[in-house]
């Protein structure tokens, strides 16, 4: 069952700049409708797990400290969404 995940524009931009993001997720992020300063995409558990791995890898080799903090915060939020989803 897919998860609906809401992203801010800034979070979307962070994701689009990841080194090895899934092209299908990129397509969904680029085509998502903006609503109230955020956008929502559907991802399945496996896609979210891979996305978390990609975020973690980029956060471990950041271009700067601010990027590291932002990626870690996003990873924490997405990890919490996945954890809650798996516990239901």
Image (cartoon, helix red, strand yellow):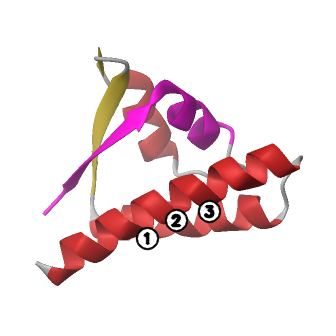
> Could you tell me which residue is drawn at 59 percent across and 31 percent down?
13
**Pointer 2 with pointer 1, Cβ within 8 A:** yes
**Pointer 2 with pointer 3, Cβ within 8 A:** yes
Q: x, y (%) of residue 72? A: 63, 60
Mark 2, other Cα within 10 Å: few <14 / some 14–19 / many ≥20? many
What residue is disc 2 on?
52
* In-front residue for pair 76/45: 76
User: Which region shows up in magenta?
Assistant: 1-17
> Could you tell me which residue is drawn at 53 percent across and 61 percent down?
75
The single residue placed furthest to the bottom in the displayed view is 87
* In-front residue for pair 57/37: 37
Q: Can residue 20 be seen here?
A: no
Q: x, y (%) of residue 64? A: 88, 47
Label 3 sits on a secondary structure element that is helix
Q: x, y (%) of residue 57? A: 71, 67
Cα–Cα gap, marks 2 and 1: 5 Å
> Could you tell me which residue is drawn at 52 percent across and 51 percent down?
22
* In-front residue for pair 10/58: 10
Q: x, y (%) of residue 38? A: 36, 26
What residue is disc 3 on?
54
Label 2 sits on a secondary structure element that is helix
Labels 3 and 1: the sequence-earlier one: 1
Side of 1 relative to 28 (left or right): left
What residue is disc 1 on?
49
Q: Is residue 39 above or below residue 1?
A: above
Label 1 sits on a secondary structure element that is helix
Cα–Cα gap, marks 2 and 3: 5 Å
Mark 1, other Cα within 10 Å: few <14 / some 14–19 / many ≥20? some
Q: Can residue 84 be seen here?
A: yes
The single residue placed furthest to the right in the displayed view is 63
């Amino acid at each position: 069952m897919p998860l609906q995940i809401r992203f801010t524009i800034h979070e979307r931009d962070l994701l689009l700049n990841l080194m090895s993001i899934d092209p299908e997720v990129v397509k969904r992020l680029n085509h998502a409708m903006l609503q109230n300063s955020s956008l929502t995409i559907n991802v399945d558990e496996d896609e979210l797990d891979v996305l978390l791995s990609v975020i973690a890898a980029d956060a471990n080799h950041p271009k700067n400290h601010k990027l590291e903090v932002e990626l870690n915060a996003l990873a924490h939020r997405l990890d919490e969404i996945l954890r809650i989803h798996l516990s239901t």
